Amino acid sequence: MAEIIIWLFIAYLVIMNIIGLAVMGIDKSKAKRHVWRIPEKVLFLVSILGGSAGTWAGMYLFRHKTKHWYFVIGMPVIFFLHIAVAVYIWRG
């Protein structure tokens, strides 16, 4: 049973990181076309909910939000907090 939970959690993280990468790409595309944008709080929410690696990668892949200090600092901080929590849980 525990093994199933671990695999479901890994699948969740993969999906959230794909979503994180996608929202950064979509928002960059919308910015170029000067149309309605994805709110910054949504970008951070996706990151906090497990998509931090995807949103952080999307920042640099799409060159998006890299001039905003709160993204340049915030996304890596969220990512490393996720890593710290994972290590803490893994070690018991």
Image (cartoon, rainbow, N blue to C red):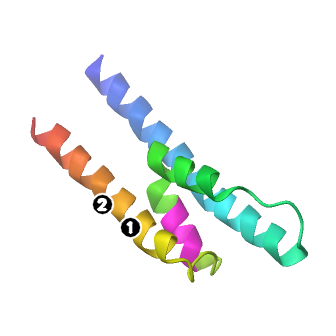
Q: Amino acid at mark 2?
A: Phe
| x, y percent for residue 83 | 27, 54
Residue at image mark 1: 76
Q: Amino acid at mark 1?
A: Pro
Residue depicted at x 86% and y 60% = 36
In the structure shown, which secondary structural element does the residue marked by tag 1 occupy? helix
Residue depicted at x 65% and y 77% = 62
In the structure shown, which secondary structural element does the residue marked by tag 2 occupy? helix
| x, y percent for residue 91 | 10, 41
Q: Is residue 5 above or below residue 83?
A: above
Span highlighted in magenta in the image: 55-60
Residue depicted at x 54% and y 62% = 55
Q: Is residue 60 left or right of residue 27?
A: left
Q: Is residue 14 left or right of residue 73?
A: right
Quadrant of the image occupied by residue 61? bottom right
Q: Marks 2 and 1: CB-CB under 8 Å?
A: yes
Residue sitting farthest toward the left = 92
Quarter in which the N terminus is drawn: top left
Q: Is residue 56 magenta?
A: yes
Q: Is residue 63 left or right of residue 88?
A: right
